[in-house]
Amino acid sequence: MKISFLLHNAYGIGGTIRSTFNVAGALAARHTVEIVSLIRTIDTPNLPLHPAVRLRPLIDLRPHEGTADATRTRGGDLGHPLLTRPSAHVPAAEARGTTNFNALTDERVADHLRHTDADVVIATRPGLVVYLAALGRADRYLRIGQEHRLHGTHRAEIRAACDAAIPHLDAYTSVSEADAATHRAHLPGVTTRLTALPNAVPATGIEPSDGRAKLVVAAGRLIPVKRYDLLVAAWATVAAKHPDWHLRIYGRGPQLPALRRQIDELGLADAITLMGAYSPIETEWAKGSIAAVTSREESFGMTIVEAMHCGVPVVATDCPHGPGEIITDGRDGLLVPVGDADGIAKGLLTLIEDEELRRSMGEAARVAARRYAPERVAAAYERLIEELRTARGTAAPAHRRRVVPPMRGRAPGTPLTSTLKGAVKQLVRKPLRPVASCRVTAGGDLSVLVEPAEVQGGELELTVTRRKSDEAPFHVPLLPPAGADPSAPWTATLDRAALDLAEGRWDLHVVRPADGARRRVVCRYAEGRGLLGLEPLPGSPFTWWIPYRTVDGYLALRTWRRPAHADARVIRPDAEGIVVEGTLHGARFGPGAAPVAVATPSRGPAGTFLTGVTALDGGRFRFTVPYQRIQEARTDDEGTAGWTLTLHKSAATDSPIRIGRVVGDIVDRDKTDLFPVTHGVRPHLTRTGDLIITSSTTGN
């Protein structure tokens, strides 16, 4: 049969889009599936979509590019007069001043629902549910609406419109059984099937958490309902007992400034990192040993299932409605009271202080998460559709199978082996489109796993090329799968002890020497879990590598290479000054060493000054830069002064060692490791990870 999903904007990022893409891809294995996007805002979707699923927009709102010809293919509906007219069907609260729904969406959706050849149409948000009820053809296809929030969380106008639309549908699904029960209680006597179908969340091929990293991870929109303020408050209790544990919060949203202030006021700047938005998030879940969800309400909880798939137990508030249906308390996670910072801290401490418990819960979480595999959710949709057809008394249509055309170029009577040889020849000439994941091994090497679908030919190579450099690239063999599994990846290993990569950023390409084809590697996952707890190679030079995904989706490598490096593991403003603690790599403190930290002017009215450093065992060091010394080093009372910090093994040496924060898994610490202004002074990390201190007369 043909199944058609209606999305508002399939080109965005969000839980509804992700879940729809997941279940559509699973259904496409047995059915013809399309996603109809009400609007299109960019060229390609942000999220991966199964190639068998057709994506079709109704309204093109992409910005124009350059020439008049571009306007015919891009942004063809920009400026359409109906965009400014209100919808005749969707309430204003959902239309949001004609931004989301308007007279043009009325027209296009009506035309689509009138002419679609789908057997089932599924609407995924209130405005689309209203359209499907008002404009859908009950005599031609099944009509199913979805609720991705909670019954009581919509504005009254939207809730009333949905409640009025539901009786005109064949089925209406919620993502939790508790919310389905709420709908049934509020809509007694409605013949529409009111049931629960969870979101689809696939497992990934990434390496799961081993529960060893002293890291708690949270992820989601930084909005009031997520109550990250409670998580930050709870972390003050956790950090007091376990200062070696850290919390990372991934996401963006309007609560960011308030959370930043709260973290600074609690003195937790070096214990909590606001990581910003990150996609795909699965690699970040796998880095953690515990996940935290502190919402006051969750319609489902996709982040919970994502974390569980990665072998991470979740400490979640027992809020309506999702967490309690996903987590089995005490077995694969912990449920804690809603709105209770002390309860959240207690739950986190329970798992922090019991390594065996969090490991066993992590294993149980991976098993439990399989309930939400797209294939299982797709099967539940198939059962629902079949039950609805039975209730109607109509037979299910035959599956619309994709027909494979006969092999081109094969004349009647031509031996198949000859044809296959010719096909293989043609295959070799196909362009390379390499897609790969990169995994850090236990020894710190990088294993690049290239998916086999878009790499053809023999004797392929992986090249590593430094940006903004005329140096010849490094060539590494790309080896085909050893076994007969056609889905196994091609592999290349970047040996950190053998490859002498200069400091900078490197791009990866797959090269086919036979015809000179060379293509940049698209990144599926850049797995950095292996970097947590990893130490640099001993001796000089100091080197460090971090694989990462570029903003345009390619696999890249950030490297550092220095004769020596002083890595600042702790940067903490206190009452007297900026406290720095770290480890020296690539050099040693000699017996009786009297090392110093030198602050060299880098900006504004400033002079050079020194501060003493205490050398500790194992190359560790500690020093404090007093606020008074910083102010005395200013040569002017106006503007902002800045200093770069370097370590000298003694006051007499002229070999400065840069102090910064490089070791770990974060590429751009200037964006994540932020510190408050104290006594007019703020520590910063540069784009290269080096530590600087600024002093401003304005206090900023």
Image: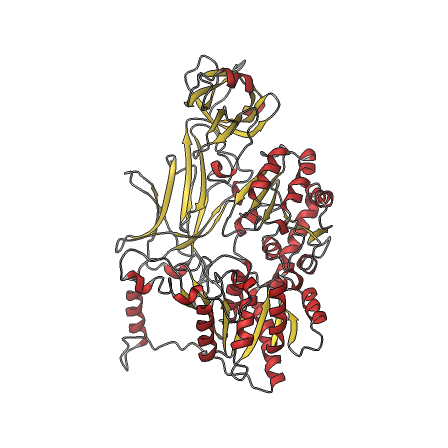
Task: Locate residue 35, reporting x and y percent.
Answer: 47, 69
Task: Locate residue 9, reporting x and y percent.
Answer: 47, 62
Number of callouts in the render? 0
Asked whether the viewer can see residue 53, the reply is: no
Residue in front for this viewpoint, 406 or 599: 599
Location of residue 40 (image quadrant) = bottom left
Q: Is residue 273 above or below residue 133?
A: above
Q: Is residue 470 above or below residue 133?
A: above
The image's colouring method is secondary structure
Residue ID at (45%, 21%): 638
Q: Is residue 34 above or below residue 457?
A: below
Task: Locate residue 359, reporting x and y percent.
Answer: 66, 48
Most distant residue in the bottom direction: 393
Residue in front for this viewpoint, 623 or 528: 623
Task: Locate residue 440, reporting x and y percent.
Answer: 49, 44
Residue ID at (52%, 41%): 531
Residue in front for this viewpoint, 198 or 471: 198
Asked whether the viewer can see residue 682, the reply is: yes
